[in-house]
Amino acid sequence: MNLLDKINSPTDLKKLKIKELEELTNEIRKKIIEVTAKNGGHVAPNLGVVELTLALHYVFNAPKDKIIWDVGHQCYTHKLITGRRKLFHTLRKKGGISGFPKREESPYDVFGTGHAGTSLSAAFGLATARDILGEDYNVIAVIGDGSLISGMALEALNHIGASGKDLIIVLNDNGMSIAKNPGAIALYLNRIITMPFYKRLRAKVWNALGKLPSGKREKARKIARMIEKRAKGFLIPGLWFEELGFHYFGPLNGHDLKGLISFFKRIEDIHGPILVHVLTKKGYGFEIAQKNPELFHGVGPFDLKSFGIIKKDNKKSFSAFFGDTLVEFAEKDKRIVAITAAMCLGTGLLKFREKFPDRFFDMGITEEHCATFAAGLTLRGLKPVFAIYSTFLQRAFDQVIHDIALQKLPVIFCIDRAGLVGEDGPTHHGTFDVSYLRFIPNFVISAPKDEDELRDLLYTALHYQKAPFAIRYPRSVVVGVQVKEKPKIINIGEWEILREGKDVCILAMGSMVYPSLDASKILGKNGISAAVINARFIKPMDEKLLEKISKRFKKIVTVEENAIKGGFGSAVLEFFEQRKIKKDVLRIGIPDRFIEHGPRDRLLYEIGLTKEGISERVKMFL
């Protein structure tokens, strides 16, 4: 029997010797690679924290002690050793365990995560609650250097350091978020890493003082810390963490399991905020992932022999098509600038990065900063295109309103992963962007039905330049239509009549246009004549056409891959209400609940956003 087969909880882990734990790391890496090869997942981040995870669970006593994993890209080892080993093969599968920490799944998942930079605030809340209630447990937040630069994490650091509360922050430093980390903080951490003399000196002094009798040990270390605080300024460029109020330790080798365990045991009696700086390598133990950490950060299923990503369809994704189109336009217009928040590969901007490095900005996980940075670029006539996942644009909501829309600044938002994203689940579904952008004044919101229309809308946005312009598209392959030789400008707000009918009119938006067209054909076979409109602009809507539709049809259906609450269908109802037009309207969209993880096609089928589901709802409506 493998060692991993004996681990049903961290209690079992504590029975193993160090040598057995080191053998266990190999078994865990093998299991992670085998399962992610079949299911897809976050390969490189999880392989990088195997030793760190085992050390934390070996020393601390979860779930009494609270361990929070920032983002959650690195929780697979944690799941394997906290009672979910037998379910691990279901990772990211429909009905299986989530690829992220999930409170409903296990008491060991203290806080649900999926977006970066949240762990420190949650940990500080836990530590504060503990002290108010007079409880006794450790709080540990594990955050990566990529997440540390996010505004929320820096706000939390500022507060935690001044609080004096007992709280341990483990900074998992692998030099990357998804791609290489940008910015001064990354440079600062790198300077710390490259001070071997200081590291060796500090370790020797600390270990020597640890050999003193217990009564003298803490006093000696307190004196040593005071001396160190004064001397460190000469040895290290900056005392940032110490000046913020943290006991700073590190950097430690994140793959030295024995050393990590020994260290975590030694800091248990230290009070106040502690920051432990741990160095790891993304993809550690899996050569192909270690060489290609950006690609293997989050991947679909891959072949264990060739290591090639298994594609179900040879068509381009909407992301890749967008990236190619932006390069095409940028070759002719030097004012075009591309911005991403650590998602260069995911948003299709790799070619742009390679071709126009001076006009490409990966700002790291700083969505708020990205949005207002883009606003600043427009002030001098540049044309910033901010490519971002729908779920992450939520993080820049205030900046979108205050810094962009209020000032009518023409930032172009290319909103990727709009709608259901599949296996990453509810933390990553982009189901709210229409709802949260629609009520903002001075905003154009659009959704192309296919790749040719995406090209036209991007071309239109680049020439409009009067207000912010959003283009939303799904996480899927392109439709496969013929793309025109030259793009055209679409009149703002203009819809497109795709099919005439007399019994019912279907107003379909973006990814739901072609399923609605197919649904109309099914309805036709049942004797129902359905008109289909491509409602490619959610704001402004084609009010003239909508007025005509209201006079011709008694029954109107709206279809969207967005939350039913406050979405496109709600906009249509508001239009009728304002004009005192009484109509029977059926709204089809994403129901008012968080949708679990699973294959995108399967999820769409279950909520009725397929040609069969749409046609059936329309028949019932009639």
Image: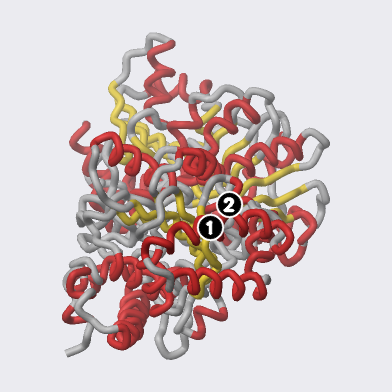
Q: Are marks 1 and 2 in contact (CB under 8 Å)?
A: yes
User: What kind of residue is marked 1?
Assistant: Tyr
Q: Quadrant of the N terminus?
A: bottom left
Q: Is residue 163 visible?
A: yes
Residue at point 58%, 27% (across, down)? 401
Residue at point 43%, 77% (across, down)? 259
Picture layout, residue 558 above or below residue 331: above
Q: Nearer the viewer, residue 162 or 190?
A: 162
Q: Secondary structure at mark 2?
A: helix
Q: Which residue is mark 2?
A: 241
Whole-angstrom CA distance, mark 1 to mark 2, is 6 Å
Side of 259 where 604 appears, left or right: left
Q: Position of residue 555 (x, y in %)?
A: 30, 26
Q: Position of residue 178 (x, y in %)?
A: 54, 63
Work out whether mark 1 precedes mark 2 in sequence or the reverse, and give the earlier one: 2
Q: Nearer the viewer, residue 495 or 157?
A: 157
Q: Which residue is mark 1?
A: 248
Q: Nearer the viewer, residue 77 or 270?
A: 270
- Count of number-bearing discs: 2
Residue at point 51%, 83% (across, down)? 288
